[in-house]
Amino acid sequence: MPSFFMSYFKYVDALLRKYHKEHDITRVEISVDKLRPFFEEMGYVDKILWEKFDFNSRIILAQIKTYEAQMGAYKDIGTYARIQISSGQNYCWKRFILCKEMYHCILDEEQENRITDTSSLLKLTDYFTNSFLDRIADENGTFKPFVTEEDAEVMALETLFPMELRRSFCDDLDDGKITAYQLALRFRIPEVYVQTAMVDSYYSAVSRGRDLINTD
């Protein structure tokens, strides 16, 4: 079983339960800003900051940097995560990328999971020459930053377009009554991820995982 399923069971379900308790996940779109406190609670960083940044890359659209600093006047030293996102992204891509990067605040607690130098960044870029589904099917466990990047991507998809909500659209999508583009507009995520989420093999695998959680 790919590692993202184990991460999904452990983190995504817990995060969605927290979100639903306070905000109700049926009120789409799922707010990335309202997710942020849960990532700060569940992850290894104390505070997550966002800022726009201009990247000279068409592949790497965001980066995350962690550092320690005083949390405020008369407060202790804490860990900050500064997420820099390419300023050229539209609203849906920005939401998805921010959610994905915040998952790194959970997944990257171990130093070996992080990108810390230029050579590692170039190596990670090379891994992204394969398509998203191909990368899931042929998981490579030899380069930890790639594995956690892939996990974060899938977990962001399952958070912003969760199984609980997309189940009701399967028949209409198959019958042509609704399109992937319309679902993307409704949930405010990139259309390519709606298409991925509805691929039979992917959908069935995640559905089995969700059913296992719900029967425990």
Image (cartoon, rainbow, N blue to C red):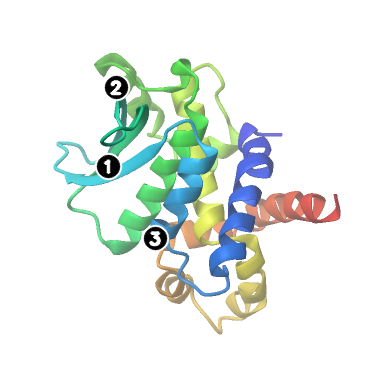
Q: In this view, does 47 lie above or below 157?
A: above
Circle 1 sits in a helix, a strand or a loop, which is it? loop
Tag 2, which secondary structure?
Answer: helix
Residue bearing mark 1: 61
Tell whether 214 sits left or right of 146. Answer: right
- At x 62%, y 37%, the residue is 7
**What's the mark number on residue 190?**
3
Q: Which of 87 and 65 is in front in this view?
A: 65
Q: Pick whichever, 151 or 123, lies toward us.
A: 151
Q: How many labels does the image show?
A: 3
Percent x, y of residue 105: 44, 35
Residue picked out by circle 2: 122
Residue 138 in picture, x, y percent from top left? 58, 31
- Give the Cα separation between the discs numbered 2 and 3: 25 Å
Expressed as whole percent of the image width and height from the top left, the position of residue 81 reads 34, 34
State which tag comes first along the sequence, 2 or 3: 2
